Image (tube, helix red, strand yellow):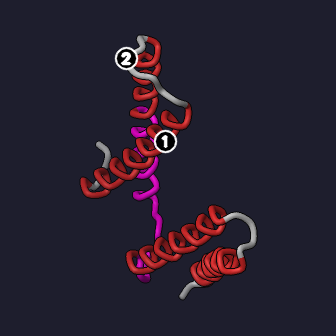
């Protein structure tokens, strides 16, 4: 196991254990301990997936960096268009929007479109 994966795994385990101890000893509020437990589990899952996917190959090369940048650029454009659509939905009073609702929608949209475009470009092989 590479040193960076090992160090990240140690940090993830410490976050998970901290959340569990906070929950057991009822230190702080229950929500914070649950957040720490979820972060620890998510970090461990991401690390295991990355280690399994890359194996001994390099994680990034020039091609994957280029395709990732294009995917993020397209995602930014889609998010910008969605932001404009949300503005007009609110301005024309089609729906009552809250700030937290809009932030949630845009956050999920950014995540899904970024990964979607990156996956599409990687499976296609190039952006041209």
Where residue 20 sits: x, y (%)? 63, 79
Disc number placed over residue 126 in the picture, else none = none
The image quadrant of residue 88 is top left
Residue positioned 64% across, 82% down in the render: 10
Residue positioned 43% across, 45% down in the render: 108
Disc number placed over residue 104 in the picture, else none = 1
Q: Where does the C terminus fall, quadrant-wise?
A: top left
The image quadrant of residue 27 is bottom right
Q: Where does the N terminus fall, quadrant-wise?
A: bottom right
Query: In front: 9, or 34?
Result: 34
Write down the residue under mark 2.
94
The magenta segment: 54-77
Query: In front: 116, or 28?
Result: 28
- Magenta stretch containing residue 110, yes or no? no
Label 2: which secondary element = loop
Q: Residues within 10 Å of mark 2 (few under 14, many from 20)?
A: few
Sequence-first disc among 2 and 1: 2
Farthest residue in the right direction?
Answer: 27
How many discs mark residues in the rendered view? 2
Where residue 100 sits: x, y (%)? 54, 37
Q: Is residue 60 above or below residue 12?
A: above
Label 1: which secondary element = helix
Residue positioned 74% across, 66% down in the render: 28
Q: Residues within 10 Å of mark 1 (few under 14, many from 20)?
A: few
Q: Main secondary structure of the magenta part?
A: helix
Query: In front: 113, or 13?
Result: 13
Question: Residue 58 vs residue 25: left or right?
Answer: left
Where residue 98 sits: x, y (%)? 52, 30
């Amino acid at each position: 196991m590479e040193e960076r994966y090992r160090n990240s795994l140690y940090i993830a385990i410490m976050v998970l254990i901290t959340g569990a101890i906070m929950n057991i000893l009822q230190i702080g509020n229950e929500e914070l301990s649950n957040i720490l437990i979820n972060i620890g589990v998510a970090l461990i899952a991401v690390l295991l997936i990355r280690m399994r996917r890359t194996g001994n190959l390099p994680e990034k090369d020039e091609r994957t960096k280029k395709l990732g940048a294009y995917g993020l650029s397209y995602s930014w454009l889609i998010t910008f268009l969605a932001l404009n659509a949300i503005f007009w939905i609110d301005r024309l009073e089609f729906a009552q929007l809250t700030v937290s609702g809009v932030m949630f929608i845009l956050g999920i949209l950014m995540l899904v479109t970024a990964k979607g475009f990156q996956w599409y470009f990687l499976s296609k092989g190039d952006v041209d």
